[in-house]
Image (spheres, rainbow, N blue to C red):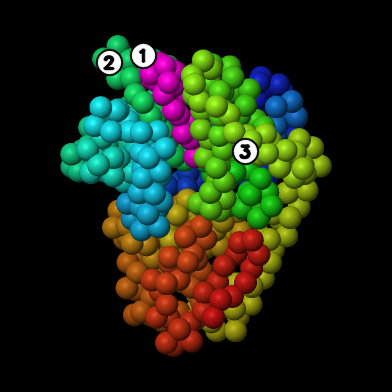
Amino acid sequence: MNTPARHCRACGAPLQHSFADLGLAPVSNAFVEPDKAAEGEMFYPLHAMVCDRCWLVQLADATRAELHFHAGYVYFSSFSSSWLAHARSYVEQATARFGLDRSSRVMEIASNDGYLLQYFQQAGIPCIGIEPSGNTAAAARARGIDTRELFFNRATAATLAAQGEQVDLLLGNNVLAHVPDLHDFVGAMPAVMKPDAVLTLEFPHLLRLIADQQFDTIYHEHYSYLSLLALMPVFARAGLRVFDIAHLPTHGGSLRVYACLEAASHAATAQVQACLELERAAGLARLDTYAAFGARMRATRRALQRFLIDARDQGRTIAAYGAAAKGNTLLNYCGIGADIIDYVVDSNPAKQGRLLPGSRIPVRAPEAVFETRPDYLLILPWNIKEELMTQMAGIRAWGGQFLLANPHIHVVA
């Protein structure tokens, strides 16, 4: 039986070129309760492909958004101190640059637990959060932040606009990659923007994913892997104009895109063209760039497997820090389970006492590291490695060492 043709979610062209095939994998945040350990899990294809017409990298098979964002969602942004500092800095910069005050209105799409909007609230700037996951939305409301529990799309944006919700600043941090229908999502934005409003979107930059071998950022919640080259036509189709770009260190290297309505007054900066030229120079408009990534990814998998197996054969003990989605991608793709890594620690109580999806490695509180004294502590969320290695610096007292798998396997004493 012929399988239906896969088409690009941005331009509709047939998808024919593989970028990164990670086989079958469970949903990265579908943690397993211990009493369900004997039951099976659902595994889904995890295969990123590249469109040779518009250069959007995307998962070939999209899982339903409701599988990821629901009342049991386990990612709370406020558990990372470095991410809170990033959010506070953004609020201070945006407030100053765009003259926001008590007469302004701010809306954040995918506002999570209010990690960012709390700083606008503290500054007296009215704000509203849009968040589909029930438990994180409840945490935001507990902070006193007006939070609507819904998915942002053309239909819900029209409802918000009819209720008078039009804003001076619309923002979305690390949400654009999480939406299966880019045009429905981006096309909804003008409905809630005032004529001279500013839109900012942050997302991990595909250029850095390729350059730094960040294949573990590929998981089912991330439908797209984004470059400015691929996004310019998407914005234009929605009637939006990109007028500035900022390169950020977050999540291994991100872009912050500043956009506005086509007729708005914001003047374009040289950064937009410079970013497009940087992406072209890095090969993001050439198929060979994408074809080479898979071979490098497979070599990294073999190197990590060899290191961990050799360490265990030598009697070394291994634990990991960070029950993050990227860690689950890495562990499942590399076939690493509880026979290699004894446990993973995480500061989020919602994850503790559960098992990682697929690998079934138990999740414990960070104190477990100091109780069991492993020889190696594998840092899974490498994007906050400095923060975590500072927190866990005490492992050096017994000769413990940190292990990182990105961009290559290396030990930090």
Disc 1 vs disc 3: which is toward the camera? 3
332 shown above or below 124: below
For label 2, the residue is 164
Which residue is drawn at the image coordinates 40% and 43% (left, top)?
93
Image height check: is 185 above or below 355? above
Q: Amino acid at mark 3?
A: Gln
Q: In this view of the protein, can residue 332 be seen by the observer? A: no
Graded by Cα atoms within 10 Å as few (under 14), some (14 to 19) or many (20 or more), the crowding at tag 3 reads some
Which element is circle 3 on? helix
Q: Earlier in the sequence, mark 2 or mark 1?
A: 1
On residue 271, the disc is 3
Q: Name the quadrant containing residue 18.
A: top right
Residue nearer the viewer, 391 or 85:
85
First to last magenta residue range: 179-202
Residue occupying the point 33% across, 43% down = 116
Q: Quadrant of residue 351?
A: bottom left
Crowding at mark 2 (Cα within 10 Å: few <14, some 14-19, many 20+) = few
